[in-house]
Image (tube, rainbow, N blue to C red):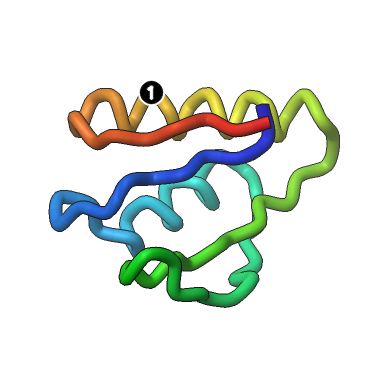
């Protein structure tokens, strides 16, 4: 579990989500945007000290997305 693909939605404020990830103790790096099937996809890399912390951050982000009722897919 190392990637989260968030489905396009107007219900999600990217800045709020990125601030939340940083509050969990990780840093974020914008890894560029691409156009896929007519939708702009922006990729962010979450940097953390170890694999366990990264797993915890991804788990917490999934919980937040569940709470906000936002569709997502965990990859890898």
- Quadrant containing the N terminus is top right
Where is residue 48? Give x, y as percent: 75, 45
Where is residue 15? Give x, y as percent: 35, 64
Q: Is residue 34 above or below residue 63?
A: below
Taking the spot 50% from the left edge, 46% from the top edge, the residue there is 21
- Quadrant containing the C terminus is top right
Q: Is 44 or 48 nearer to us in this picture?
A: 44
Q: Using residue 72 as the reference point, say whether residue 74 is left or right of it.
A: right
Q: Quadrant of residue 51?
A: top right
- The residue that mark 1 highlights is 63
Q: Residue furthest right?
A: 50
Mark 1 surroundings: few (<14), some (14-19) or many (≥20) residues within 10 A: few
Q: Using residue 58 as the reference point, say whether residue 27 is left or right of it.
A: right
Q: Is residue 32 above or below residue 58?
A: below
Q: Using residue 41 as the reference point, say whether residue 54 is left or right of it.
A: right
Q: Residue furthest left?
A: 11
Taking the spot 15% from the left edge, 50% from the top edge, the residue there is 11
Taking the spot 83% from the left edge, 42% from the top edge, the residue there is 49
Q: Quadrant of residue 29?
A: bottom right
Q: How many labels, in total? A: 1
Q: Is residue 51 above or below residue 24?
A: above
Where is residue 59? Give x, y as percent: 53, 24
Q: Check disc 1 and report its element: helix, strand or loop.
A: helix
Q: Is 8 or 64 nearer to us in this picture?
A: 8
Q: Is 6 or 18 nearer to us in this picture?
A: 6
Q: Is residue 59 above or below residue 18?
A: above
Q: Quadrant of residue 58?
A: top right
């Amino acid at each position: 579990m190392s990637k989260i693909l968030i489905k396009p939605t107007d219900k999600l404020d990217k800045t709020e989500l990125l601030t939340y990830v940083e509050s969990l103790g990780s840093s974020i790096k914008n890894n560029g945007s691409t156009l896929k099937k007519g939708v702009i996809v922006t990729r962010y890399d979450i940097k953390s000290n170890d694999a366990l912390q990264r797993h915890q951050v991804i788990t917490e982000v999934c919980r937040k997305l569940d709470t906000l009722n936002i569709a997502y897919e965990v990859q890898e």
